[in-house]
Amino acid sequence: MKMKHLNALLLLSWLFAACESQQQSPSSPGELVVAEVGDKPITAAEFAEFSSLIPEGMREGDTPLAVARNLLNSLIDKELLLQEAQASNIENMIWFIDELTNYERSRILRLYEQREIISKLNITEEMVDAHYRATRRDRSIRLGGIMVDTEEEANSLYQQLQDGADFHQLARTHSVHRESAERGGDTGLYQLRDQLMPEVVAKVADLEIGEIAPPVSMFVAREQKFAIFTVLDEIPAPLEASEARIREELLIAQRNQRLQTMLDSLRGEYHPQPQPQNLALLAERISQFTGEEFTPAEDDAALPVCTFGKGDPIALRTFVETIRQMKIAPQMLIDTEGAADLLDRRVIPEHLFMSEIINAGLDQDPEFRASIAAKRQELMVTGLRKIMVDQQLSVTPEEARTFYDEHPEKFTKPTTTVAIEILVSSDSLAQHLFTELAQATEAEAETLAVRHSERAEALHHNGRINFNIYTEQFFPGVSDLAQDLEVGQVGGPVRTQRGYSVFKVLDRQREHIPYTEDSERRARAYVLIDKAQNRYVEYVRSLRKIYPITIHEDHLKQYTAAQS
């Protein structure tokens, strides 16, 4: 019985999330009352709307009537929680007001952006082609590099190169990246712009063959290094290799440009006039405040921090509330220059866009209003649970240790297959490397990977990749095959979006995590979740003893028969 009630509450938790994405449907005339919670009737129409949101896989019961009865109990639980939350005055708590206001603001701004900006963007083939060439994505480059440990050495080598020193000779004698150093700094890879690290792109994207970039700071295996790059060669790269990224960049740029144009237009229409004297007064008030939550005094609250040529001003109280809802501490406003900057860059633009939204009536959009109503209910219930359940719970060190000892499977790392992988652009080369890998020692396999692999992000590990449930999404096809092979076997070639992959399995590990501060924290979290679920069930049951509940079984049967 306890498990059935727990399932009903899990269903209810899912429902609150689902309701956010659902537009409320208009109620049908079904005034048949199937239950009452306190003085609130639950009509057949409300029950039908509730039931329509529940997927078949989450319905329990051997008969249609049993399913309906379980669903009705879930709806009753929801109503109990909402009534208790309302009685607890949760809607007037600052955190509730801030959370709902933030959600409402972000949701309506996204709706406005979608209708007025995103839907009007247009990326043409000519724009794509121009950006493709302007960003030098029309080529794949082979870099030469000299990597050293300090910025001083990098600057010294760069100056020597500027004075005519031989790049390859300096790479052989100074580069700490030994594999490429042996080849005079030649990485041996042809790489697209989007395959390079951003800090490298900034230095080399526009280089011509033979040109040398100033030193770039980069992290390799979590250690800071400094590298000097030159372009050794280039080959043409097809548009298809980077078209998705190009379109994304163009859309973002066009969106930002349109947003700025609209904002400039609104500033010209509304003529915002900041009031620095009131920002100074606010800074003085906050600096003198010694309590926990700053709120302006009544005499100050209505003072404007910004007036407009048309429309209402931004009052001091509204400014403080908005800053708080942005998760910015009021103490930041003691700096009047910083406060003026926040007002100009964030608060005024949002005020202008919200004014346009309200004038256009977008805040009355039915889908938007439905999402706000659903969010309000969700916050009421989650807030009630936090206050009445979560904040009442604790976990002792003994409970955490007992859980750790009794559930070793939760403290064991996933099975990890360690392999050396080589990614190349042609099937024939992959076939050849497959044969070489089959005969290669571990050290020889690493050398092959460094020499041939185009997966640059794995080269600082000499081509080693750990395949497990956390990394398999990054290596589709390759990960599954690698985890099926025995240690010592070679797999591939596997065709991927980036080329052909071959690999040799070196090891397979499954490590148990020792009891440390970190694993103790995890054990505490597991115990806390279990306690919270059980306490939540008990709490909802206790509400059933406080609020009178009536289920009209005959009406429920009538409703179920009509649905069949």
Image: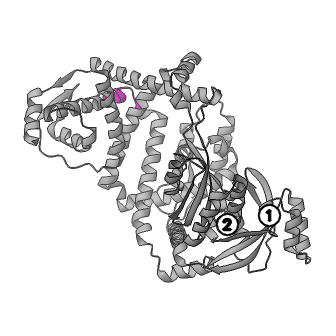
For the question of whether residue 374 can be seen, the reply is: yes
Residue 98 located within the stretch drawn in magenta: no
Q: Quadrant of residue 227?
A: bottom right
As drawn, 6 above or below 315:
above
- Residue named by callout 2: 452
Task: Give the labeled residue for mark 1.
Answer: 227
Q: Nearer the viewer, mark 2 or mark 1?
A: 2
Query: x, y percentage for residue 430?
Result: 58, 67
- Numbered label attached to residue 466: none
Which percent across, then down, holds residue 329? 62, 41
How many numbered tags mark residues here? 2
Q: Residue at position x 65%, y 62% from top? A: 436
Residue 453 horizontal/vertical position (percent): 65, 64
- On the question of residue 307 being in view, the answer is no
Rendered view: 435 above or below 468: below
Q: Amino acid at mark 2?
A: His
**Are there few (<14), some (14-19), or many (20+) residues within 10 Å of tag 1?**
many
Asked which colour scheme the image uses, the reply is one colour
* Residue shown at 91% from the left, 66% from the top: 156
Q: First in sequence: mark 2 or mark 1?
A: 1
Q: Which residue is depicted at the point 75% across and 77% down?
A: 232
Image coordinates of residue 140 in percent, x first then y, are 64, 75
Residue 82 counted in the magenta span: yes
Q: Kindly identify the amino acid type of the residue bearing the numbered disc 1.
A: Ala
Query: For this view, does 395 lie left or right of residue 462?
Result: left
Q: Real-space Cα distance between discs 2 and 1?
A: 21 Å
Give residue 210's quadrant in the image: bottom right
Q: Which residues are magenta?
A: 81-90
Figure quadrant of residue 207? bottom right
